[in-house]
Image (spheres, rainbow, N blue to C red):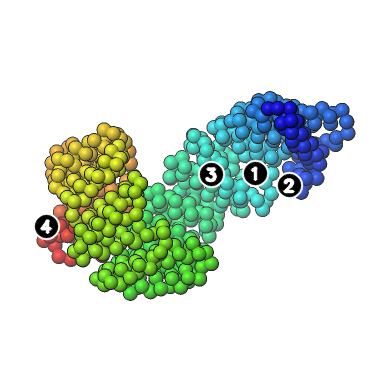
């Protein structure tokens, strides 16, 4: 750096330092405008000593120039000394920020603590100490600081402060301790009618993050007891439903009787869809569209469900309304994306009607670059359904794109096409090409194993699944698939059970693995245990495959009315399900 550059740099830092000094001298007025409470706590004493002002200016100047030229340690020391001389909150904050920017958490904490000691009523100082302690995972030191933060929070802002706690304490590594600390700090807020609902919801979310589902459910119940129209309690209950706590659903339905908010119904419907409770989801969506006819997303999801249930006229009416609303959107990108989704659904409706020219016409209307691939994949499916499988495969192979990712997407689409056509041997060959692109990708090898099974290559399937287990010992899907395959064939049942139990160690709440356990127990002749496991799995996830297994166990136990009821539900959801058809045929049952 030559002399000229040095002088330019000196001048720029001199200006920066002067600006900082002016902010120090005028901080009382500035802070009052920003936050009256913090101003009173952080304002410096009047600057009246010119010698002190000069010293202070020099320390600030050296602090800034050191921090900006790669010596944050010196910058921190100068700024902290300037803060102590002036007892100014902004300089303490700057010292802490310099330490944070250089990833020196302990030094940042020291600056924040010095700030709080000098200005004990400063809310900003207290907040800095609190947040730094949480970041350093010193959670046990935060209760008093959290109490002060809540005490100093203005009444109208307290709800927002409480609602932010799960995010703040979400950084803690020991989330169980975080939940205990927050609960201790919120004793007064939890009991207060005004703040109790949001305080309980926040505590519930922290408990849920710690894996304490029962504690989170209790918190949601207490929030709703204080406010039976608490949307926060309902949202927490929805999170619990997604986490496999069905008891939480009562809180959602209770809230909806007092608070019929269409957006809450929409959120409830999404959770129900995730749980594959399609009829219940449809009912909530229908209610939501009645309460708020311009709720755009609800019409599209409703159309998808009606299409799935072969209620084609209803699906078309839903799409017509969706397009009316979407066409009025002022956001061109949102409008284009929404119309593209509608055209794809219209194409599927035409496909179900065997009106392939109409389906093709809908697909041709899609000009959204991001959805061209989906549209072409549907076109390939149409060709395949008309017996033009080779032409369909050629269409996918010739789609634009030459990168590895492009090739991967095209091969995935081709595998899906061949699966739909039940050409499993061909699908297995294409999946082998996919695996060659990423031989260590456990999911791709797993899918290859599943296709090998469909193609009748059971020895290949087992070899591939054991390869996945060796590469990724915690990949529970592989244990479950191998155990279930053995159970389905009635082979090596003790080994099958051990494989499934191993899968459950990694994913204890997975209803599909619980289904596998029930099925292997049934194959081993333990029908009572099988029924217990399968009923639990079906309650958690009313999937067609689980329902078919539960139905067969109930049938074998003589509870044929219950079996028929479950099979009819399964048939309504998925009339073409292969497992259902095979089971009914084998048992000689007609629905």
The Cα atoms of the two marked residues, 2 and 4, are separated by 76 Å
- Spatial CA distance of label 3 from label 1 is 14 Å
Residue 182 showing in the rendered view = yes
Q: Are marks 4 and 3 in contact (CB under 8 Å)?
A: no
Q: Residue at x 49, y 34 (%)?
A: 174
How many residues crowd around disc 3 within 10 Å: few (fewer than 14), some, or many (20 or more)? Answer: many
Q: Nearer the viewer, mark 3 or mark 1?
A: 3
Return the residue at label 2. Answer: 35
Give the image location of residue 465, x and y in percent.
Answer: 23, 39
Q: Which residue is mark 1?
A: 150
Q: Earlier in the sequence, mark 1 or mark 4?
A: 1
Q: Secondary structure at mark 1?
A: helix
Quickly name the residue at label 3.
Answer: 166
Quadrant (top left/top right/bottom left/bottom right) for the C terminus: bottom left
Q: CA distance from mark 1 to mark 4?
A: 66 Å
Q: Residue at x 83, y 35 (%)?
A: 45
Image quadrant where one finds the N terminus: top right
For marks 2 and 3, the one nearer the N-term is: 2
Residue bearing the label numbered 4? 586
Residue 272, given in percent of the width and then of the height, sits at 38, 58
Which label sits in the foreground, 2 or 4? 2
């Amino acid at each position: 750096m030559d002399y000229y550059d040095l002088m330019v740099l000196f001048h720029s830092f001199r200006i920066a330092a002067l600006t900082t000094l002016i902010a120090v001298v005028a901080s009382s007025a500035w802070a009052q405008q920003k936050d009256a409470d913090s101003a009173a706590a952080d304002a410096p004493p009047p600057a009246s000593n010119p010698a002190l002002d000069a010293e202070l200016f020099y320390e600030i100047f050296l602090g800034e120039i050191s921090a900006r030229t790669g010596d944050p340690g010196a910058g921190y020391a100068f700024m902290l000394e300037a803060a102590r001389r002036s007892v100014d909150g902004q300089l303490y904050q700057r010292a802490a920020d310099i330490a944070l920017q250089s990833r020196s958490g302990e030094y940042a904490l020291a600056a924040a603590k010095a700030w709080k000691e000098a200005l004990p009523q400063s809310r900003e100082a207290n907040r800095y100490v609190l947040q730094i302690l949480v970041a350093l995972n010193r959670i046990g030191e935060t209760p008093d600081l959290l109490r002060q933060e809540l005490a100093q929070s203005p009444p109208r802002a307290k709800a927002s402060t409480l609602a932010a706690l799960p995010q703040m304490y979400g950084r803690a590594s020991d989330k169980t301790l975080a939940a205990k600390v927050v609960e201790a700090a919120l004793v007064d807020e939890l009991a207060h009618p005004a703040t109790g609902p949001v305080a309980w919801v926040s505590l519930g979310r922290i408990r849920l993050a710690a894996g304490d589902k029962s504690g989170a459910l209790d918190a949601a119940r207490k929030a709703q007891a204080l406010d039976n129209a608490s949307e926060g309690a309902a949202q927490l209950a929805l999170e619990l439903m997604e986490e496999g706590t069905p008891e939480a659903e009562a809180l959602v339905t209770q809230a909806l009787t007092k608070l019929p908010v269409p957006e809450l119904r929409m959120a409830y419907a999404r959770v129900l869809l995730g749980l594959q409770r399609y009829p219940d989801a449809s009912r909530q969506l229908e209610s939501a569209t009645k309460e708020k006819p311009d709720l755009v997303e609800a019409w599209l999801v409703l159309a998808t469900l009606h299409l799935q249930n072969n209620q084609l006229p209803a699906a078309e009416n839903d799409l017509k309304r969706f397009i009316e609303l979407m066409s009025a959107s002022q956001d061109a990108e949102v409008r284009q994306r929404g119309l593209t989704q509608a055209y794809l659904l219209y194409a599927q409706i035409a496909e179900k009607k065997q009106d392939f020219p109409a389906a093709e016409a809908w697909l041709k209307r899609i000009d959204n670059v991001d959805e061209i691939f989906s549209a072409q994949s549907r076109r390939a499916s149409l060709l395949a359904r008309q017996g033009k499988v080779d032409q369909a495969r050629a269409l996918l192979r010739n789609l634009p794109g030459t990168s590895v990712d492009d090739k991967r997407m095209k091969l995935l689409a081709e595998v899906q096409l061949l699966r739909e056509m039940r050409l499993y041997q061909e699908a297995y060959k294409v999946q082998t090409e996919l695996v060659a692109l990423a031989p260590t990708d456990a999911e791709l090898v797993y899918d290859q194993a599943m296709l090998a099974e469909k193609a009748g290559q059971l020895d290949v399937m087992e070899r591939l699944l054991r390869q996945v287990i060796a590469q990724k010992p915690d990949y529970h899907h592989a244990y479950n698939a191998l155990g279930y395959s053995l159970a389905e064939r009635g082979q090596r049942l003790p080994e099958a059970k051990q494989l499934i139990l191993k899968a459950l160690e990694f994913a204890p709440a997975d209803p599909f693995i619980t289904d596998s356990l029930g099925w292997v127990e049934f194959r081993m002749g333990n029908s009572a245990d099988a029924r217990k496991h399968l009923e639990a799995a079906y309650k958690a996830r009313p999937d067609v495959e689980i329902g078919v297994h539960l139905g067969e166990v109930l049938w074998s136990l003589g509870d044929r009315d219950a079996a028929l009821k479950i099979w009819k539900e399964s048939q309504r959801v998925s009339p073409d399900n292969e497992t259902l058809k095979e089971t009914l045929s084998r048992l000689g049952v007609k629905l």
